[in-house]
Image (cartoon, rainbow, N blue to C red):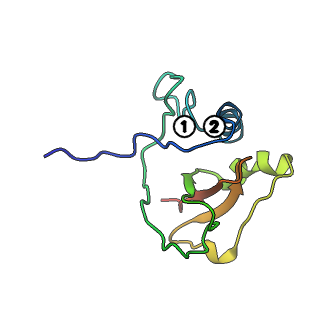
Amino acid sequence: MGHVKGIGGLFFRSRDPATLKAWYQQRLGVGGGCSADDSAPPNEWVWNVTAGPLVFEPFKAESDYFPSDRQYMINLRVDDLDAVLAPFRAAGEEIITKKEWDDPAIGRFARVHDPEGNPIELWEPPAI
């Protein structure tokens, strides 16, 4: 029997796909042509990621953890939350943090939104 080895893509609707794609590439280094490290040559369709933990978890429909008008929230694993948030701060974009989200055993979290209002959770796992 074969085994699923990971998520192979994330597809979502957009009012302006080209602009949103460029925002993700520029603001977060995410999307086709981006690489989390230099382990593979750039590919216009593929974002080369670094292996690590991934949480796959359905939430209750009435959850208030992310906006009720959104069906999903992407969580991006980062190695330096403050550095990843720097471009958002420089642009004057909203960054949401809550002390109750952070836990030394789980890591640090922050929430931002893309230009179309989709929530993005940034997660810095604890140092090993």
Frontmost of labels 1 and 2 is: 2
Relative height, residue 125 to residue 59 (above, below): above
Q: Residue at x 64, y 78 (%)?
A: 100
Give the image location of residue 10, x and y in percent.
Answer: 49, 43
The residue under label 1 is which amino acid type? Answer: Ala
The residue under label 2 is which amino acid type? Answer: Gly
- Label 2 SS: loop
Q: On the rendered structure, is 89 left or right of 97? A: right
**Crowd class of label 2 (few under 14; some 14 to 19; many from 20; radius 10 Å):** some
Relative height, residue 99 to residue 83 (above, below): below
Q: Which comes sooner in the sequence, label 1 or label 2?
A: 2
The label number, if any, that marks residue 88 in the structure image: none
The reply to whether the C-beta atoms of the residues labelled 1 and 2 are less than 8 Å apart is yes
Q: Residue at x 58, y 58 (%)?
A: 123
Q: CA distance from mark 1 to mark 2?
A: 8 Å
Q: On the rendered structure, is 5 left or right of 7? A: left
Q: Residue at x 48, y 34 (%)?
A: 48
Front one among 10 and 69: 69
Give the image location of residue 8, x and y in percent.
Answer: 40, 40
Give the image location of residue 71, x and y in percent.
Answer: 55, 60
Front one among 10 and 100: 10
Which residue does the numbered mark 1 point to in the structure image?
36
- Label 1 SS: loop
Relative height, residue 21 to residue 98 (above, below): above
Could you say which quadrant of the image residue 122 lies in? bottom right
The label number, if any, that marks residue 29 in the structure image: 2
As drawn, which residue projects farthest toward the left?
Answer: 1
Q: Residue at x 54, y 32 (%)?
A: 35
**Crowd class of label 1 (few under 14; some 14 to 19; many from 20; radius 10 Å):** some
Tally of marks: 2
